Image (tube, grey):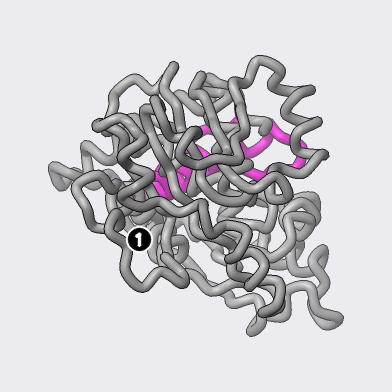
């Protein structure tokens, strides 16, 4: 939320620059001797590989720490103690945690910049990758529309913020009981009053006349009984051939992956999907930009925000 429109625009521009250099096999190494720490409480494929590949591509190295193995947040290693110690050894830290409060607490005690690699409330790296994919496919994205079909989760919140900053119309299509939480809506109204954000309970109506569709998988965490209720509630909220008939011919589909519970999807590998395209910047260039500008390329980025969380 603290990133301005100028910050978001610069991030996308620099991501494009780094991706172009990567495409022609130009690999500058501005981070030689720098070390990125990755502290993950949750398992990961794309986030872990992308950040480790990014720091290596920029000439640096990484240290991966599983939360269970190193005891993050345990009686043995409290979050403040963990942050104080690890931030002395590395130049920047990527946190992938269950609770957003852990990110905030960690950042308040850390001596180095913190990148939010995912928490239960925000997923800014995914949002940046998705908006960059939109930019690559459509060019100028200001004035376009992104439809998020799914619950008002961490990815949806981050996308809503990014869209507001970049002038993109954001539509959340979900059952009423799975809309954004009240504190988030209040914060958006207070800090981004001009955001073009709408809600719909009919995925087909929400997708009609829209220029871009994004599908996020249904959250599969929690007790089995709760999961069953969620699957029932979202039965009509599926990205399929019928839904795509209601969307413009040029509309594309994204999915942040993994596709949990989806055995076969007619849209996942169709010509209208950008799921694999949106994972490409997540695998390389977007984390590269975070590593470079967020931690070391711009001195003010590490000190601009009191929390030191780049999210």
Number of numbered labels in the structure image: 1
75 shown above or below 187: below
Residue 193 appears anywhere in the view: yes
Residues 150 and 98: in front is 150
Residue 58 appears anywhere in the view: no
Q: x, y percentage for residue 96? A: 60, 62
267 shown above or below 148: below
User: Mark 1 packing: few (<14 Cα in 10 Å), some, or many (20+)?
Assistant: many
Magenta-colored span: 284-310
Q: x, y percentage for residue 231? A: 58, 66
Q: x, y percentage for residue 268? A: 30, 57
Q: x, y percentage for residue 234? A: 57, 57
Quadrant position of residue 23: top left
Which residue matches tag 1?
53
Rendered residue at 15%/47% (across/down): 25
Rendered residue at 74%/61% (across/down): 99
Quadrant position of residue 199: top right
The kind of secondary structure element at disc 1 is helix
Is 20 displayed left or right of 297 in the figure? left
Rendered residue at 31%/39% (across/down): 245
Is 28 displayed left or right of 30 in the figure? left
Rendered residue at 40%/45% (across/down): 286
Q: Main secondary structure of the magenta part?
A: helix
Is 65 displayed left or right of 289 in the figure? right
Location of the N terminus by quadrant is top right
Location of the C terminus by quadrant is top right
Q: Is residue 80 magenta?
A: no
Q: Is residue 299 magenta?
A: yes
Residues 2 and 176: in front is 176
């Amino acid at each position: 939320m603290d990133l301005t429109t100028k910050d978001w625009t610069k991030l996308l521009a620099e991501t494009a620059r780094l991706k172009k250099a990567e495409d022609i096999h130009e690999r500058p190494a501005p981070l030689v001797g720098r070390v990125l720490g990755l502290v993950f409480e949750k398992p990961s494929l794309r986030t872990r590989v992308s950040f480790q590949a990014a720091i290596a591509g920029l000439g640096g190295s990484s240290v991966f720490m599983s939360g269970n193995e190193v005891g993050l947040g345990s009686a043995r290693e409290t979050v403040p103690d963990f942050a104080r110690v690890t931030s002395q050894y590395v130049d920047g830290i990527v946190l992938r945690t269950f609770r957003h409060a852990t990110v905030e607490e960690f950042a308040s005690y850390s001596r180095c910049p913190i990148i939010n690699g995912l928490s239960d409330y925000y997923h800014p790296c995914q949002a940046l990758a998705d908006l960059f994919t939109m930019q690559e496919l459509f060019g100028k994205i200001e004035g376009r529309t992104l439809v998020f079909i799914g619950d008002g989760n961490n990815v949806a919140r981050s996308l809503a913020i990014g869209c507001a900053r970049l002038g993109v119309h954001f539509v959340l299509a979900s059952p009423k009981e799975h809309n954004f939480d009240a504190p988030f809506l209040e914060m958006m109204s207070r800090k981004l009053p001009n955001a073009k954000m709408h809600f719909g309970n009919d995925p087909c109506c929400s997708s009609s006349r829209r220029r871009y569709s994004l599908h996020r998988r249904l959250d599969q965490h929690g007790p089995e009984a709760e999961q069953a209720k969620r699957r029932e509630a979202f039965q009509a909220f599926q990205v399929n051939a019928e839904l795509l008939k209601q969307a413009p011919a040029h509309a594309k589909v994204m999915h942040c992956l993994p596709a949990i519970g989806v055995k076969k999807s007619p849209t996942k590998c169709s010509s209208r999907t950008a799921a694999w395209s949106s994972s490409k910047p997540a695998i390389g260039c977007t984390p590269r930009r975070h590593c470079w500008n967020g931690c070391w390329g711009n001195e003010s980025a590490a000190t601009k925000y009191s929390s030191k969380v780049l999210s």
